[in-house]
Image (spheres, helix red, strand yellow):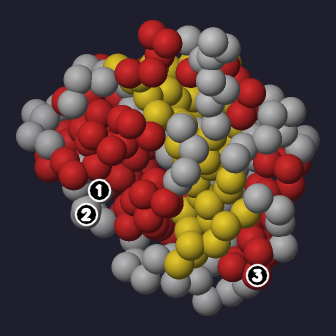
Amino acid sequence: MPKKQLSLSLVIPAYNEERYLETCLKAIEAQTVKPLEVLVVNNNSTDKTAEVAAGFNRVRVINETRQGIVFARNAGFDNAQGDVIGRIDADTILPENWVEKILDFYSKEDNLNSACTGYAYFYNLHMPNFSGRFGEQIAIRFNWLLLGHYILYGSNMAMPKTIWQKIKSSTCSRTDIHEDMDLAVHAHRGGFKIVYLPHLKVGVMARRISGPDRAQQWPFLMLWPQTLRVHKLWSWIICWATAVLLYVCSPIMLLIEKRTKAN
């Protein structure tokens, strides 16, 4: 009997994302292998997020009234009909073979008990690949040292639906932590492996470095050590010190970015 072809549902939590969502969905339309469905979870948007999403094929709009990305994510994951759940953000730009790579990874039976993740380049910065490699060292490599396992990067991750069904009741429904890091902690503690795929790169916007959400940089950074504290990891102290250092250094990095762009 031929092996069943797996299907993928792609979940995009969205709050006031009309500026970026169209580009994100066009990249999904251009995939070499199409997802079964795209679930845009409208989290009380006051702009045209829902209208933009409704204009695309394969897109299903789900409304989640509880405010917070964790609630939007959960609504999307719970409504996903595919064998595999992919998760990205509304400003993510997928390479055309992203879905193909994810399904190829899960075509190997040994990977069906694993969640997988990749990282990104920052398309709104002058040196997108360089800044992406720097971010990778912090978000992927350094967090591995702090946690003892890889994180799940919310803009670029996937897991079999069976894993979500087994761990969802243990995940935290808090808005004061990084929900994607929390998801990784509970997947790991549930006995599932998290695999980092270094060549699985997507484009994202560095909003809190050089973008519209830069004013939220400090509270966003503080979610990082708070996530570790909630999960009783002593390494939150190292995390807090690193977050402070990143915040202090970010104006210097922004100035370098602007001068490099000007030249």
Q: What is the x, y in percent for residue 49?
A: 69, 77
Q: In this view, does 210 lie to the left or right of 62?
A: right
x, y (%) of residue 183? 33, 43
Pick out the residue farthest to the front: 1
Looking at the picture, tell me which residue is in the foreground, 84 or 96. Answer: 84
Front one among 104 and 252: 104
Residue 139: give x, y in percent of width and height: 45, 33
Q: What element carries label 1?
A: loop
Which residue is disc 1 drawn over?
177
Residue 51's tag is: 3
Residue 186 seen in render: yes
Determine which quarter of the picture holds residue 138. top left
Sequence-first disc among 3 and 2: 3
* Dot 3 crowding, Cα within 10 Å, few <14, some 14–19, many 20+: few
In the image, what residue occupies the spot 27% across and 40% down?
A: 166
Between disc 3 and disc 2, the foreground one is 3
Alpha-carbon neighbours of circle 2 within 10 Å: few (<14), some, or many (≥20)? some
Q: Residue 83: image x %, image y %?
A: 54, 38
| Tag 2 near tag 1, CB within 8 Å | yes
Callouts 3 and 1 close, C-beta under 8 Å: no
Q: Mark 2 points at which residue?
A: 174
Which tag, 3 or 1, sits closer to the chain's start? 3
Q: Which residue is drawn at 35% across and 29% down?
A: 143
Marks 3 and 1, how far apart at CA? 30 Å
| Res 129 → quadrant | top right
Q: Residue at x 14, y 49 (%)?
A: 230
Q: Mark 2: which secondary structure?
A: loop
Q: Is residue 144 visible?
A: no
